Amino acid sequence: MARSFDAAFEAEFASLHRYLARRLGSSVADDLAAETFAVAFRSWDRLDPERPVRPWLYGIAANLVRHHWRKERRMLRAYARTGVDPVFANEDEAVERADADTRAQELAAALGELRRDEREVLLLHAWAELPDSEVADALGLPLGTVKSRLSRAREKLRNRLTEVGQEPVEAA
Amino acid sequence: MTDELLDSFRSEVPLPDDATFRHAYAHATHARRRLVTRRRVAVAALVAAAAGLAGGLSAAFVGASSNVNPQRQQIVNRAAAQVRRAFGDHRIAKATLRGSLLTVDVPGHGALQSTVGGLEGVVLAHVAEDDLQAAGEEGIDNIYVGNWGGTALSPFPAQSQLPTDACDIPAGTQLADTTSASGRVIPLLGGFCLFRLTTAHPKSFDAEAILNQLRAAIPASDQGGTRHRAQIFEVYDEKGKPVIVVAWGGGTNEGGSVYIRPGLSSPLAGP
């Protein structure tokens, strides 16, 4: 049965938007999520019917996010430095969040220090909840590359958080 | 636990509301309708030209697109010409201002189109914004640049004008794996540097180290504070094909774009 764009939009828009908002804030997510589906709509007729829609959409989104990687890094570093997360900068509770969670600040610093390609794989896995095979599909990478990037990213986070006094964690 | 911490990080980000949902759906599906309409217009224009009626009909089309204000569009056209001259290329095929949305057409998907071409579009938006405001016109709220996508146009911080020799690479500067290197000022938005390098060793070229060498050779203060200015860094192989291209919007706040030739490691992933 042919897949409908409307059904895919209905099923995936909210989670894709939330994923982008966690990375770049709601305002940027509004634009990128809308543009992701605009690109998808234009290419809908050419989509391989056997190919899962979800990783394809996240792959389009990843291409769009690529243009904002410096901004994302700036936001993570700003959060790590000030304790105020720019992702929530337009919300009233932004100031109240300051200093609320130093562990989150350390994580922001660690994420900001990751290589762009490692952060991409890690966040697609952790926040978009894509399994490794779908991350590979989304980014057009071999499965082994995804696994090694994911492993490296986790190790870097673990080391960084251990350095600043977090408890050590077991390997994923 | 790292995984738990990662799961909870920014987990309170809200889901999009109904208005966002509706707007996104309209944007996605409207984009297709607009494309179809343009295609029809193009076909109609061809037919009209064949019949010797193109002049009259194209005037009718301009009149029909009522949300393109000819006076404002003229300002954008002048700004586009200025950007093309400054960059010395014609990557921007067309720029159209409809209401407060500027759409910049940068056709093609090559290494330079998708990086420098995108930045040219962003620079054009800021130049046109300044010119519109100087003419007492309403400014630009949003831009859509081919290859870079759409975004709100952020305010551009005022910059002192960079001297024309600010990006010259001092004689005697040795850059590893580099057979030629030059820098010049793009004199827009206060001026910013464009560096062009050639390497005989694309696979071992350490772009990050070379960029740092360049920055050390030309102190940031001489470049007007690199963090607040756009910057372009192009590396070619000896056949003139792009190896690495970095186009950064700097203080324009519209981000940046990096091309790294497939098969090479990405030395600029985490500078």
Image (cartoon, helix red, strand yellow):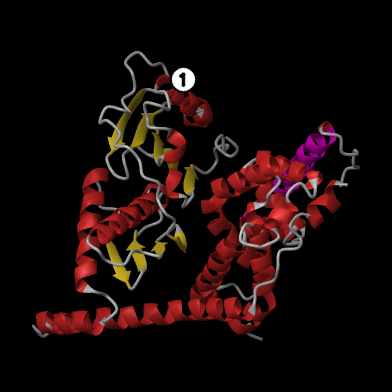
Residue under pointer 1: B176
**Residue A11 lies in what quarter of the image?**
bottom right
Q: In the visual, does B157 lie left or right of A161?
A: left
Magenta part of the protein: which range? A139-162
Q: Chain of mark 1?
A: B
Whether residue A145 appears in magenta in the rendering, the answer is: yes
User: Was residue B69 drawn as part of the magenta stretch in this picture?
Assistant: no
Q: Position of residue B140 (x, y in %)?
A: 36, 64
Q: Residue at x 37, y 52 (%)?
A: B113
Magenta segment, prevailing SS (helix, strand or loop)? helix
Determine whether, in the image, residue A72 is placed left or right of residue B227: right
Residue at position x 36%, y 33% in the image: B195
For the residue pair B223 and B243, the one nearer the viewer reads as B223
Amino acid at dot 1: Ala
Please state, as top left, top right, bottom left or bottom right, where the C terminus of chain B lies in the image: top right
Residue B176 location, x and y as percent? 46, 20
Image position of B86 (left or right of B107): left
Q: Is residue A40 above or below residue A123?
A: below
Q: Decide if residue B70 is on the left or right side of residue B35.
A: left
User: Could you tell me residue B76's position as x and y percent?
Assistant: 25, 62
Residue A51 can be seen, yes or no: no
Residue count near mark 1 (Cα–Cα under 10 Å), binned few <14, some 14–19, many ≥20? some
